[in-house]
């Protein structure tokens, strides 16, 4: 296989928790190996606390990994050090944040952010070229007329428009990969689809890849080419989106799917409705971290951490019980 | 639409009757009509879902029903008859007698609604003592009982809010609302801070409690699909008015208002073929400058000339009320 745009090997992040004298360690991300190809939207899905945002911050170089390595275009990220190199990497891999109401400075017009990005990352452009470039990216994300929208203040824009500004700002850097951390979860339902469509069109027309972090598996299905499901810092299951969702092998993926409210489906409330919560992974012993919630758990699950195994072509799950062929249904 | 606000017309099986309720925010820059003549009846033990986008007035309506509005918001007309008494204009003292005992409110963010420096048990006991329960034994017993009802171990009565997970905080808020077994529980997006698995389990929990204890629920959410399996009736609000109001199943299976149709089509599905969706272009109306015609007209795919000049009434179609000229002719509804 050709070298992907970005891949990680054994990516691990631990945080110290408790007071200064505490020796307790939170295992936020543990041994994550993922790959993002060119022109691809990869969804990273999981509950809060599953480590998905930590992965994004590691990829954005906001955190130093405890162990493991990130390779961008084949080169290890630990080698990217000097200011110029880091700046270039941040331009190649920008981030779009969750809260469109908190991520803009209210006293500046929205042109301010995008102009600064251009000045910093593309110093070769003249003022005139910067303005043209800003208008171009604003038009690309559907903020038209661009010259008018650029002159507005954040409070004059709706949540959906602000999130588009976030994408425009990222796009101005001519990125290879946009890290989008829950970009639609704060938006109204009627607006969300527009943003998801925008992500797909950026992939198709601008040729960028997007890591789409979400807890909404239905929107992941709508927009993502591949899906990574995380649980308690580990990858539980990964593969092409449609393949994983039509044949979920990991019991946790099945649980996530069963919990999605679907007005088109008939009501099925079983007595077996899961009441569990994801664990805070502090100094864990070996074993599967999902076993307390898993109706299929066997003895081995309490002893050995299940490795990610390829069960079907390109489709892997970290589960001792999961099989390629047999239907192992934990949750309906 | 009828405008009788007297409790005389109260049907026997009604726990709450809201008539032509309007709420305005009196701001320096002008008046914002956030809720415009909303009427609804609620039967004992009924589950009513209210959905809409941010700024559609759904939370303001809830606060108006619970008499929790603070300045600059004010009820400008209409009545809220709860158990035969008009709640509008009651004094704080009269209201405190009703709150928690007959009517409880569960807020969106339990982290903000719970007192961070008091244990869960202390907050339960505050609410009970405020209603004249003095016996420590009784308080402890009831507190443990309601916590068990929502599936939390009573040892957590000693816990502080920050020691609980988001799901457990929300559950303990619901437990607190159950202290006196009220007849009406009002919930403002209680699950929106939770993720999908916790959300599902909380909804199932709420429904089970309701079946067990028989209280009525008004449940406000922006996520239409969330209530699809739980509510008996569904009210879709848009720009401060009722857009559609009918049996939940009917609204989902055959939505009438173009806005409801658009909302339903904005949800990507987890099953079936992957189809491109469009959402609803544009944004909700500015309630400080309400357009003369239908409030949804600027975003409506089926807009007609009439829609832009004349506001539509609520029309009744097969038991569903809908505010749209496409359904004019079914006769005005009495919503």
Image (cartoon, coloured by chain):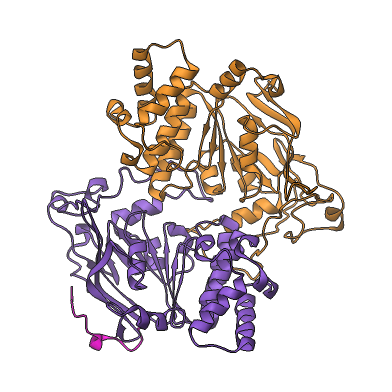
Q: Does residue A85 appear in this view?
A: yes
The structure residue drawn at horizontal position 58% and vertical position 68%, both measured from the top left corner, is B171
Answer left or right for B70 relative to A105.
left
The structure residue drawn at horizontal position 46% and vertical position 13%, both measured from the top left corner, is A123
Residue B287 x %, y %: 24, 53
**Chain letter corresponding to the colour purple:** B
Q: Nearer the viewer, residue B127 or A310?
A: B127
Relative vertical location of residue B8 with respect to residue A54 in this rendering, above or below = below
Point out the residue furthest to the front here: A20
Indicate yes or no whether the magenta region holds residue A9. Answer: no
Q: Colour of chain A?
A: orange
Residue A61 x %, y %: 63, 29
Q: Nearer the viewer, residue B309 or A289?
A: A289
Q: Does residue A268 appear in this view?
A: no
For the N terminus of chain A, the image quarter is top right
The structure residue drawn at horizontal position 67% and vertical position 40%, both measured from the top left corner, is A238
Answer left or right for A279 relative to B305.
right
Q: Quadrant of residue B209?
A: bottom right
Relative vertical location of residue B68 with respect to residue A72 in this rendering, above or below = below
Write down the region rendered in magenta: B1-14
Q: Magenta region, mostly helix, strand or loop?
A: loop
């Amino acid at each position: 296989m050709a070298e992907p745009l970005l891949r990680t090997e054994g990516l691990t992040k631990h945080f110290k928790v408790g007071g200064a004298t505490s020796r307790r360690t939170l295992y936020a991300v543990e041994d994550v190996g993922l790959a993002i190809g060119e022109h691809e939207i990869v969804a990273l899905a999981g509950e809060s606390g599953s480590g998905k945002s930590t992965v994004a911050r590691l990829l954005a170089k906001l955190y130093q990994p405890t162990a493991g390595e990130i390779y961008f275009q084949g080169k290890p990220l630990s080698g990217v050090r000097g200011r110029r190199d880091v700046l270039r990497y941040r331009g190649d891999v920008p981030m779009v944040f969750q809260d469109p109401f908190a991520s803009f400075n209210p006293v500046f017009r929205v042109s301010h952010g995008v102009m600064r990005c251009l000045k910093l990352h593309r110093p070769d452009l003249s003022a005139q070229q910067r303005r043209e470039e800003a208008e171009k990216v604003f038009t690309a994300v559907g903020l038209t007329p661009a010259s008018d929208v650029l002159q507005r203040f954040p409070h004059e824009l709706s949540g959906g428009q602000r999130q588009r500004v976030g994408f425009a700002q990222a796009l101005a850097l001519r990125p290879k990969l946009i890290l989008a951390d829950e970009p639609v979860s704060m938006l109204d339902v009627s607006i969300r689809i527009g943003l998801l469509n925008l992500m797909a069109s950026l992939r198709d027309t601008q040729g960028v890849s997007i890591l789409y972090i979400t807890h909404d598996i239905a929107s992941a299905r709508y927009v993502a080419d591949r899906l990574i499901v995380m649980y308690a810092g580990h990858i539980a299951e990964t593969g092409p989106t449609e393949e994983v969702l039509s044949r979920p092998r990991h019991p946790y993926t099945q649980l996530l799917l069963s919990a999605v409210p679907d007005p088109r489906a008939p009501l099925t409330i079983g007595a077996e409705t899961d009441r569990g919560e994801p664990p805070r992974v502090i100094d864990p012993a070996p074993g599967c971290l999902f076993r307390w919630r898993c109706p299929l758990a066997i003895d081995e699950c309490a002893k050995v951490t299940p490795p990610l195994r390829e069960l079907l072509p390109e489709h892997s799950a970290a589960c001792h019980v999961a099989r390629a062929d047999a239907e192992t249904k934990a949750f309906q | 639409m009828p405008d009788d606000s007297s409790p005389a017309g109260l049907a026997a099986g009604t726990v709450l009757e809201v008539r032509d309720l309007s709420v305005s925010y009196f701001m320096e820059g002008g008046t914002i009509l956030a809720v415009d003549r909303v009427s609804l009846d609620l039967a004992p033990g009924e589950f009513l879902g209210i959905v809409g986008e941010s700024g559609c007035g759904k939370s303001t309506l809830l606060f108006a029903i619970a008499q929790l509005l603070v300045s600059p918001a004010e009820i400008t007309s209409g009545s809220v008859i709860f158990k035969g008494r008009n709640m509008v204009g009651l004094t704080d003292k009269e209201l405190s007698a009703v709150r928690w005992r007959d009517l409880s409110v569960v807020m969106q963010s339990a982290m903000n609604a719970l007192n961070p420096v008091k244990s869960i048990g202390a907050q339960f006991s505050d609410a009970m003592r405020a209603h004249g329960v003095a016996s420590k034994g009784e308080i402890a017993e009831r507190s443990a009982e309601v916590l068990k009802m929502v599936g939390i171990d009573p040892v957590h009565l000693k816990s502080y809010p920050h020691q609980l997970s988001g799901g457990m905080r929300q559950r303990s808020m619901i437990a607190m609302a159950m202290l006196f077994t009220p007849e009406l529980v009002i919930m403002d997006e209680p699950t929106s801070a939770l993720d999908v698995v916790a959300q599902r389990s909380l909804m199932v929990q709420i429904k089970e409690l309701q079946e067990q204890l028989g209280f009525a629920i008004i449940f406000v959410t922006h996520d239409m699909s969330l209530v699809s399996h739980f509510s008996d009736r569904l009210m879709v609000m848009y720009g401060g008015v009722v857009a559609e109001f009918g049996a939940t199943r009917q609204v989902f299976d055959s939505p009438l208002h173009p806005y409801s149709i658009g909302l339903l089509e904005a949800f990507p599905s987890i099953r079936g073929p992957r189809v491109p969706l469009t959402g609803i272009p544009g944004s909700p109306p500015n309630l400080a400058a309400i357009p003369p015609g239908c409030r949804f007209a600027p975003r409506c795919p089926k807009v007609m000339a009439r829609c832009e000049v004349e506001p539509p009434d609520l029309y009744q179609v097969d038991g569903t009320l809908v505010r749209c000229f496409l359904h004019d002719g079914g006769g005005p509804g009495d919503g």
